[in-house]
Image (spheres, grey):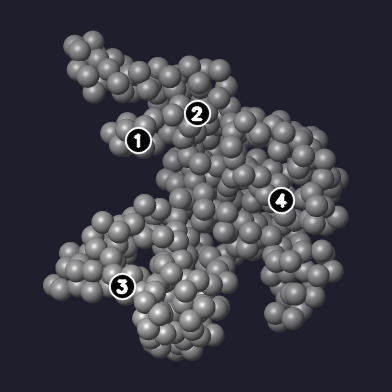
């Protein structure tokens, strides 16, 4: 599933260093603004300990984790909505993503230039928020010109859509994001999605901290948490420079020792990847056999035929049933045959909604 998280932020906040840690693709990283111009795209594996446990029990020929795509987008500056800096190009790149990882500088270092002269992550957040909101306001007002004419004729769908646009306009003009306008019906959700607004995308705030703050955060992280408390958005913190150091270590033992010295139980990028996966509203199901143990990505709420279609479209077209084992049951009994003997394998039809961690075997006929 080609769903993307875009890494955004002001210049010199550590976006490209972070991207390098996340992806095998190596983005240029340097101490000057607009180092990143074209967006860098990386496909990254999602850490999942359940795969390791399944591998121990099944002993397959290979193990395949699930993946997501991360995009490193050029740094934004004040006035981007009017074309300043890389303005329109930057905003177009964000529009193509499904969720946003907003990187904020939360460390002091006189050797790294800050485009506004001093460290203030809340101000930095507001600069980007304002630019995204201004661009969305422009798009909403343009759409209203079209919709309002149809609404004036009494068209019920147009009236409802116009009401949504009015509510969004009010939010944006008051310095809030369009995502704060709640919609319920499937038709309304579809309409909002088609608008491709920047501030309707789910967002995760990532605080880039110094070495001394990677275990417990710092005053800047607390400032960010307070500033976004009403947004219902997750706030993570990590040290991009430290993650880069971890990335350079070749052996698992060396990495674990380094993490222990830093007071960490796992690399910060692992937490970030898992949070990004959650941000994209994704779940994982597994297939497990001697040839391959594999994790598959689905959108939350997908039915069994839809999940089968992720493997191959023929599986969805010819779907008959799904044999389902819950992950905990597989771990408890140790094999598919023992799960069957215990009567713990479910046989599900077309309406079954796949749950995170399900181990699936599809029956189909083409």
In space, the residues marked 3 and 1 are separated at their CA atoms by 32 Å
The answer to whether mark 4 and mark 1 are in CB contact below 8 A is: no
Q: Residues within 10 Å of mark 1 (few under 14, many from 20)?
A: few
Q: Secondary structure at mark 1?
A: helix
Residue 71 placement, left or right of 194 = right
Residue for badge 2: 180
The answer to whether mark 4 and mark 3 are in CB contact below 8 A is: no
Q: Looking at the image, is mark 2 or mark 4 earlier in the sequence? A: 2
Taking the spot 20% from the left edge, 72% from the top edge, the residue there is: 364
Q: In the image, is residue 337 above or below residue 271?
A: below
Q: Looking at the rendering, in which quadrant would you find the N terminus? A: bottom left
Q: Nearer the viewer, residue 95 or 183?
A: 183
Q: In the image, is residue 4 above or below residue 133?
A: below
In space, the residues marked 2 and 3 are separated at their CA atoms by 40 Å
In space, the residues marked 4 and 1 are separated at their CA atoms by 31 Å
Report x, y in % for residue 54: 50, 79
Q: Looking at the rendering, in which quadrant would you find the C terminus? A: bottom left
Residue for badge 4: 237
Q: In the image, is residue 342 above or below residue 262?
A: below
Q: Secondary structure at mark 2?
A: helix
In space, the residues marked 2 and 4 are separated at their CA atoms by 24 Å
Q: Looking at the image, is mark 4 or mark 3 earlier in the sequence? A: 4
């Amino acid at each position: 599933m080609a769903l993307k998280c875009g890494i955004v932020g002001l210049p010199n906040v550590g976006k490209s260093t972070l991207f390098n840690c996340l992806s095998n693709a190596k983005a240029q990283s340097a101490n000057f603004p607009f180092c990143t111009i074209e967006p860098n795209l990386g496909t990254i594996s999602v850490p999942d300990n359940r795969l390791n446990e399944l591998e121990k029990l099944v002993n397959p020929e290979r193990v395949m984790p699930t993946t997501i795509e991360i995009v490193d987008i050029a740094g934004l500056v004040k006035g981007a909505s009017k074309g300043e800096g890389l303005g329109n190009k930057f905003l177009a790149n964000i529009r193509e993503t499904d969720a946003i990882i907003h990187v904020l500088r939360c460390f002091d270092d006189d050797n790294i230039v800050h485009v506004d002269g001093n460290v203030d992550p809340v101000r930095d957040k507001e600069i980007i928020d304002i630019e995204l909101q201004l661009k969305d306001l422009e798009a909403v007002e343009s759409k209203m010109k079209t919709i309002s004419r149809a609404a004036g004729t009494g068209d019920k769908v147009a009236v409802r859509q116009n009401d949504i646009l009015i509510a969004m306009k009010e939010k944006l003009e008051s310095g809030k994001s369009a995502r704060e306008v709640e919609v319920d019906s499937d038709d309304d959700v579809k309409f909002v999605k088609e608008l491709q607004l920047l501030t309707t995308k789910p967002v995760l705030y990532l605080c880039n901290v110094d070495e001394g703050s990677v275990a417990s955060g710092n005053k800047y992280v607390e400032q960010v948490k307070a500033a976004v408390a009403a947004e219902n958005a997750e706030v993570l913190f990590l040290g991009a420079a430290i993650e880069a150091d971890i990335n350079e270590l070749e052996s698992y033992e060396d990495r674990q020792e380094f993490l222990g010295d830093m007071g960490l139980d796992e690399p910060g990028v692992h937490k970030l990847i898992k949070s990004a996966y959650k941000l994209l509203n994704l779940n994982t199901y597994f297939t497990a056999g001697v040839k391959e143990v594999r994790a598959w990505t689905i959108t939350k709420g997908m039915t069994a035929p839809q999940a089968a279609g992720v493997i191959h479209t023929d599986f969805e077209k010819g779907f008959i049933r799904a044999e389902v084992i819950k992950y905990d049951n597989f771990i408890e009994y140790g094999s598919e045959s023992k799960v069957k003997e215990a009567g713990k394998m479910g046989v599900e039809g077309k309406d079954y909604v796949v749950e995170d961690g399900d181990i699936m075997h599809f029956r189909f006929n083409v």
